[in-house]
Amino acid sequence: MEMSKEKYQDLMLRFAKELYEVGVTEDMKKIAQAQMNRTPNAASCGAEDDVRKFFYRHDGFTIEAVQTVKLVLKKCK
Protein backbone atom coordinates (compact mmCIF):
# COMPACT_ATOMS: atom_id res chain seq x y z
CA MET A 1 0.00 0.00 0.00
CA GLU A 2 1.49 3.31 -1.06
CA MET A 3 0.66 6.45 0.88
CA SER A 4 0.46 9.91 -0.64
CA LYS A 5 2.48 12.79 0.83
CA GLU A 6 -0.68 14.69 1.83
CA LYS A 7 -2.18 11.68 3.63
CA TYR A 8 1.12 11.13 5.48
CA GLN A 9 1.27 14.77 6.59
CA ASP A 10 -2.36 14.66 7.77
CA LEU A 11 -1.69 11.52 9.82
CA MET A 12 1.47 12.99 11.38
CA LEU A 13 -0.40 16.20 12.32
CA ARG A 14 -3.24 14.17 13.84
CA PHE A 15 -0.72 12.06 15.79
CA ALA A 16 1.05 15.18 17.12
CA LYS A 17 -2.27 16.73 18.22
CA GLU A 18 -3.32 13.56 20.02
CA LEU A 19 0.02 13.34 21.85
CA TYR A 20 -0.38 16.96 22.95
CA GLU A 21 -3.96 16.40 24.16
CA VAL A 22 -2.95 13.36 26.21
CA GLY A 23 -0.10 15.29 27.85
CA VAL A 24 3.04 13.73 26.39
CA THR A 25 5.96 16.08 27.07
CA GLU A 26 8.97 16.78 24.88
CA ASP A 27 11.20 15.15 27.50
CA MET A 28 9.22 11.93 27.23
CA LYS A 29 9.62 11.94 23.45
CA LYS A 30 13.37 12.54 23.77
CA ILE A 31 13.76 9.73 26.33
CA ALA A 32 11.91 7.24 24.10
CA GLN A 33 13.90 8.35 21.05
CA ALA A 34 17.19 7.96 22.94
CA GLN A 35 16.19 4.45 24.04
CA MET A 36 15.40 3.45 20.45
CA ASN A 37 18.68 4.93 19.20
CA ARG A 38 20.65 3.20 21.95
CA THR A 39 19.05 -0.22 21.41
CA PRO A 40 17.64 -0.33 17.85
CA ASN A 41 16.81 -4.06 18.06
CA ALA A 42 14.55 -3.67 21.10
CA ALA A 43 10.91 -4.62 20.57
CA SER A 44 9.61 -1.67 22.59
CA CYS A 45 10.63 1.33 24.65
CA GLY A 46 8.84 3.93 26.68
CA ALA A 47 8.76 6.72 29.19
CA GLU A 48 6.46 7.63 32.07
CA ASP A 49 5.96 11.01 33.72
CA ASP A 50 3.65 12.64 36.26
CA VAL A 51 2.26 15.64 34.40
CA ARG A 52 -0.05 17.00 37.11
CA LYS A 53 -0.10 16.63 40.87
CA PHE A 54 -2.50 17.79 43.52
CA PHE A 55 -1.78 17.49 47.22
CA TYR A 56 -3.97 18.77 50.05
CA ARG A 57 -3.63 18.23 53.81
CA HIS A 58 -6.24 19.25 56.37
CA ASP A 59 -7.22 18.13 59.85
CA GLY A 60 -5.18 14.90 59.78
CA PHE A 61 -6.29 13.86 56.29
CA THR A 62 -4.37 13.97 53.04
CA ILE A 63 -5.78 14.07 49.53
CA GLU A 64 -3.41 13.39 46.67
CA ALA A 65 -4.18 13.11 42.96
CA VAL A 66 -1.61 12.39 40.27
CA GLN A 67 -2.07 12.32 36.51
CA THR A 68 0.52 10.05 34.93
CA VAL A 69 1.21 9.79 31.22
CA LYS A 70 2.91 6.70 29.83
CA LEU A 71 4.36 6.66 26.32
CA VAL A 72 5.14 3.23 24.83
CA LEU A 73 6.61 2.64 21.39
CA LYS A 74 6.37 -0.88 19.96
CA LYS A 75 7.59 -2.29 16.68
CA CYS A 76 4.91 -3.95 14.59
CA LYS A 77 5.39 -6.49 11.83
Image (cartoon, rainbow, N blue to C red):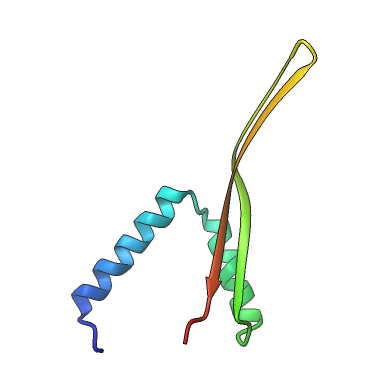
**Quadrant placement of the N terminus:** bottom left
Where residue 58 sits, quadrant-wise, is: top right
Q: Give the vertical position of 1 relative to 5 (above or below).
A: below
Horizontal relation, residue 57 to residue 35: left or right? right
**Numbered disc total:** 0
Spot occupied by residue 25 in the image (x, y as percentages of width and height): 52, 53
Spot occupied by residue 10 in the image (x, y as percentages of width and height): 24, 67
Query: Residue drawn 63% across and 74% down?
Result: 35
Horizontal relation, residue 25 to residue 53: left or right? left
Residue furthest toward the right? 60
Residue furthest toward the top? 59
Q: Using the image as rendered, state which of residue 26 and residue 75 is in the foreground.
A: 75
Spot occupied by residue 76 in the image (x, y as percentages of width and height): 48, 82
Horizontal relation, residue 71 to residue 57: left or right? left
Query: Residue drawn 36% across and 63% down?
Result: 15
Q: Give the vertical position of 61 relative to 15 (above or below).
A: above
Query: Residue drawn 60% across and 76% down?
Result: 44
Q: Using the image as rendered, state which of residue 2 and residue 12 is in the foreground.
A: 2
Query: Residue drawn 55% across and 61% down?
Result: 71
Q: Give the vertical position of 49 relative to 29 (above or below).
A: above
Spot occupied by residue 16 in the image (x, y as percentages of width and height): 37, 60
